[in-house]
Amino acid sequence: TQLLEQSPQFLSIQEGENLTVYCNSSSVFSSLQWYRQEPGEGPVLLVTVVTGGEVKKLKRLTFQFGDARKDSSLHITAAQPGDTGLYLCAGNFGNEKLTFGTGTRLTIIP
Amino acid sequence: DSGVTQTPKHLITATGQRVTLRCSPRSGDLSVYWYQQSLDQGLQFLIQYYNGEERAKGNILERFSAQQFPDLHSELNLSSLELGDSALYFCASSVRPGLKAYNEQFFGPGTRLTVL
């Protein structure tokens, strides 16, 4: 059974600060997605990373895929209140099923 | 808006009852996935259908069943409901397997089920 661990579980920071959240697995991902979910809504796909060492940027968000494809990170620069939400990583392990991490609940304080 | 629709938005029912949740995938997507999200369990994969056929099964209880119809909409049936079934139920859809090298799923807004 593949497990994805996300850390930290909760993060509360001031507006304007930078932060990084992590997603780790003991197994190799064939691909990994990051989603953001707001209360009472469905997860929204932010990015997909496929190649080991890959870095993707989405405005102030930078996503990195580990060289060994077992881990990923999401870095947010100059966090804003609109970044508040639950961040979920989800991995493909060679099939169509997505395995979701436990999530990082991020709160940006104005 | 992901293009995936789910109805109803909210559902309140009693223990022992049976409910049906409905999902319409994005236009062109052939795969539909059902997930359960509760506070203590995170997002749990229940079942996947592709073009009307069951393709993968996750942690789905025997009291739960699903199907995908010829028009590709899907229904999740939950029976003999228990208090612990209270959760958010999400449907997601993706393009057909093999079309992409990786599986991106697009989620609907969910159905919040409350069992009293």
Image: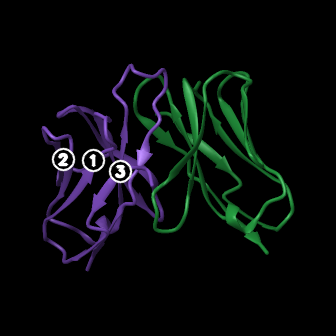
Chain colours: A green, B purple
> In the picture shown, does residue A53 fall above or below B49?
above
Q: Are marks 2 and 3 on the same chain?
A: yes
Place of residue B10 in the rendered image (x, y in percent of width and height, measured from the top left):
30, 72
Name the amino acid type tagged 1. Ile
Question: To which chain does the residue with label 3 belong?
Answer: B
Q: Residues within 10 Å of mark 1 (few under 14, many from 20)?
A: some
- For the point 48% across and 62% down, the residue is B40
Asked whether, in this view, residue A76 is left or right of residue B73, the answer is right
Task: From the image, state whether disc 1 or disc 2 is nearer to you.
Answer: 2
- For the point 37% across and 31% down, the residue is B95
**Residue picked out by circle 2:** B66
Instruction: Estimate the spatial distance between the alpha carbons at disc 2 and disc 3, rounded to whole Å.
Output: 17 Å
Question: To which chain does the residue with label 1 belong?
Answer: B
On the image, which quarter does residue B77 sit in? bottom left
**Residue picked out by circle 1:** B60
Answer with mark 1 or mark 2, whichever residue precedes in sequence: 1
Place of residue A93 in the rendered image (x, y in percent of width and height, measured from the top left):
49, 27
Q: Residues within 10 Å of mark 2 (few under 14, many from 20)?
A: many
Quadrant of the frame with the N terminus of chain B:
bottom left
Asked whether, in this view, residue B98 is left or right of residue B81, the answer is right
Task: From the image, state whether disc 3 or disc 1 is nearer to you.
Answer: 3
**Residue picked out by circle 3:** B4
Q: Residues within 10 Å of mark 3 (few under 14, many from 20)?
A: many
Disc 1 element: loop
Task: Determine whether label 1 and label 2 are within 8 Å by CB.
Answer: yes
Instruction: Estimate the spatial distance between the alpha carbons at disc 3 and disc 1, rounded to whole Å.
Output: 21 Å
Name the amino acid type tagged 2. Ala
Place of residue B87 in the rendered image (x, y in percent of width and height, measured from the top left):
36, 65
